[in-house]
Image: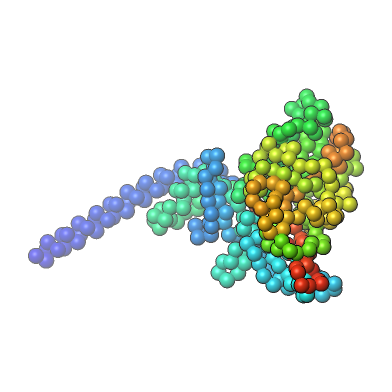
Amino acid sequence: MKLRKILLIGGGIVLLLAIGISLQVYFSQTETKLGEVPKNLELKASKEKIIAAEDKEGIKIYRYISDIESTPQEIVEKGKIVKESSRTKNGIIFDLGENKKRALIFADNEPFVKYNGKWMWTAVATTTPDVFDEQISWFRRLLLPKKVYATNFNAEAGDGWSCYYNGGTENWATVRGAATGNCGNSTVTPMNDGASGGVGTWLTGADMVNDRIFFPFDTNAISDAATITAATLNFFVTSTQNAQTASFTLVQTSQASETALVADDYNNFTYTEGTDTRWAFSDFSTKTYYSITLNATGRGWIKKSGAASNCGVTAGWTCLGMITSLDADNTAPTGFNVATITASESATNKPYLDVTYTEPGGTTPRRRFVPVI
């Protein structure tokens, strides 16, 4: 009897070892195949930090929690330091007293989330569905906790740039007046720090390109009864080139969807300017934030809670953009004029809308940061 038990136990151990060896061989072979994936496809977060994922046009797009903390924010208002009072899903609120607020609203669906008791910035990345599913599999991670794969990607957000390239033959009138774009970064090209593209109008040889930037913001956090008294669009410049004393200005856009930008949106904007001051490309030092002050026209474009939007179908969305002075004034380029700007998909330096407003019953406004979504 004892011998039988020993034999059964021994046989079970041998069987488990055989299964383990077989699985090790299988996953080792799989890992060899995955090892052929380019380094830039390596996943940027562990499974528990991936908060959303979807398949789109054969690509797996996912949002993840970065390792960069979104520390408590402070602003200076009339010489005094004011700390943040609350956060919405895409904004930071500062209570300035007497029903006055200021909001920083980011161009992002979910720019930050609470993780282990701290606010952390989020970012967006991609990989192939097969690689993503293989690496996220809990069973595989249990047996072989290896690295996984992905790369920066513009998804789950409607900001970006749409452009038109003349193919080396078409003239400026065709480039500027095209009904749809034929290049840009709507769903296939990143506009993160270091990526090419942005706002620009340029000519090199026979090649001519016109770039237009789109920034949709969910501004529903501003109540319908509020009075907006000031606003700036804030953006982070990573590189510039200026060949003919060009500048760029602020306009209102009307992209078809507030959460996705496509080539067809190239001409979905107005040439009416929402600022009294244009930014010259030569004024920029790279790797820093700049802001455009909205005039009365520009402030009128900010949609409060429930207001019909100028883009997409969802109420309460503010849709802004930037074009060059050459584009606005219908002047053909003679050189390279472009500024690269960080997009919302980056874990840092996201574009945002800074709005000061007063709610009913008060005499002083509040301030809010609104991120691009």
Q: Is residue 366 above or below residue 321?
A: below
- Quarter of the rendering containing residue 45: bottom right
Q: Is residue 335 above or below residue 5?
A: above
Q: Is residue 194 left or right of residue 328?
A: left
State the residue in front, 209 or 284.
Answer: 209
Residue situated furthest left in the rendering? 1
Q: Is residue 346 left or right of residue 20?
A: right
- Quarter of the rendering containing residue 316: bottom right
Residue at 72 percent across and 52 percent down: it is 318
Picture coordinates of residue 182, whole percent (x, y): 69, 33
Visible residue check, residue 349: no
Q: Is residue 89 above or below residue 274?
A: below
- Quarter of the rendering containing residue 325: top right
State the residue in front, 309 or 320.
Answer: 309
Residue at 82 percent across and 33 percent down: it is 203
Residue at 76 percent across and 40 percent down: it is 211
Quarter of the picture containing the N terminus is bottom left
Residue at 75 percent across and 68 percent down: it is 359
Picture coordinates of residue 331, whole percent (x, y): 88, 35
Visible residue check, residue 315: yes
